[in-house]
Image (cartoon, rainbow, N blue to C red):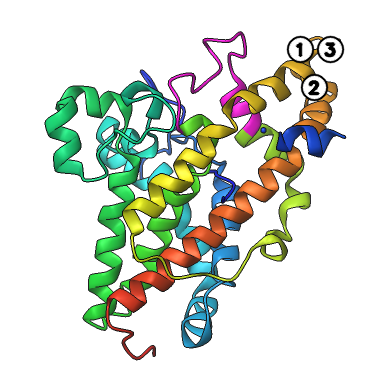
Amino acid sequence: MPIGFGCLNRARWAWGLMVAVALGLPWPAPADGWGLEAHVLINRAACTTVPGPLRRFFMRHQAFIGEHGKDPDTVFTVREGEAERMRHWIDLDELDRFPFRNIPRNYEKALAKYGRERLKEAGLLPWRIAELYARLVQAMRESDWKRVPLFAAHLGHYVADGHQPLHTTTNYDGQLTGNQGIHKRFENEMIRRHLGQYQDLAAFTQPAQRTADPVGFTFDFMIDSYVWVDNLLRADTLARHGVHGYHDAYYAALYVFAGKLAKLSMAQAATDLGSLWYSAWIEAGQPKVP
């Protein structure tokens, strides 16, 4: 089962594994998700996972794909505001009980079941991934290779968000369990303070694999992400024990409890992203790669 990862919004401007680890316009604040640099690292690492001629193409555009992984948290959020931000999460437990088998994977069926307002409140992340995956398939099928790196980069952002446990739950900021603020502390500040420890992300990835059901694949890794919510909240509780405020001692402790979890989850995001890129190419008919 893949390890899942990685937008703090409600008026949103907006892991067992943990135990093993322990033993023109001014840009607004990002719509969260992994911090911007983490999104760059995940997209760049994904370029190393795809096979053969695809690998050569993606590695040639690696810097571009990495940099434009930031766009949904910057350019898109400025341009589209709340309409964009709701694409960065899905509160699975708002729509169903674990293991969430009753959530329709098809958007139109989900819309019919829950209604537009409830679905918007719960978040639209899996269907945003499906939309961008379809655009990538079309660009490859038409041999429009100039558009492929940008679509691939943007798809990477949302896939990464889907591997962040707090993007899958109504308790998205620990506000229901006394862990208020954990969202940004975990995915942003902890990563920023230890960014050097995440530079070798590609070493923790696996080769991309074809998935015949991209939508089901997407829901699977988001459900995997949800599994780790309680353990991540426990990591925050342990890190706060005996310390006052969110300063060096807290972040050092949080890194002990959740730092490797973040790294492995980011690496899984890169692996799953590479698998979606590879699957899009196969679905497009395996066109010749320039």
**Is residue 53 at least partly visible in the picture?**
yes
Q: Is the stretch drawn in magenta largely helix, strand or loop?
A: loop
The stretch in magenta equals 168-186
Whether the residues at callouts 2 and 3 have beta carbons within 8 Å, the answer is: yes
Secondary structure at badge 1 equals: loop
* Amino acid type, label 1: Gly
Give yes or no for contact between labels 2 and 1 (Cβ–Cβ under 8 Å). yes
Residue where numbered disc 1 is placed: 245
Q: Secondary structure at mark 2?
A: helix
Q: Give the quadrant of residue 276.
A: bottom left
Q: Residue type at mark 3: give it.
A: Val
Circle 3 residues within 10 Å: few <14, some 14–19, many ≥20: few
Residue 20 pos. (x, y %):
80, 38
**Front residue of this view, candidates 78 and 8:** 8
Q: CA distance from mark 2 to mark 1?
A: 7 Å
Q: Amino acid at mark 2?
A: Tyr
According to the picture, the residue beneath numbered tag 3 turns out to be: 243
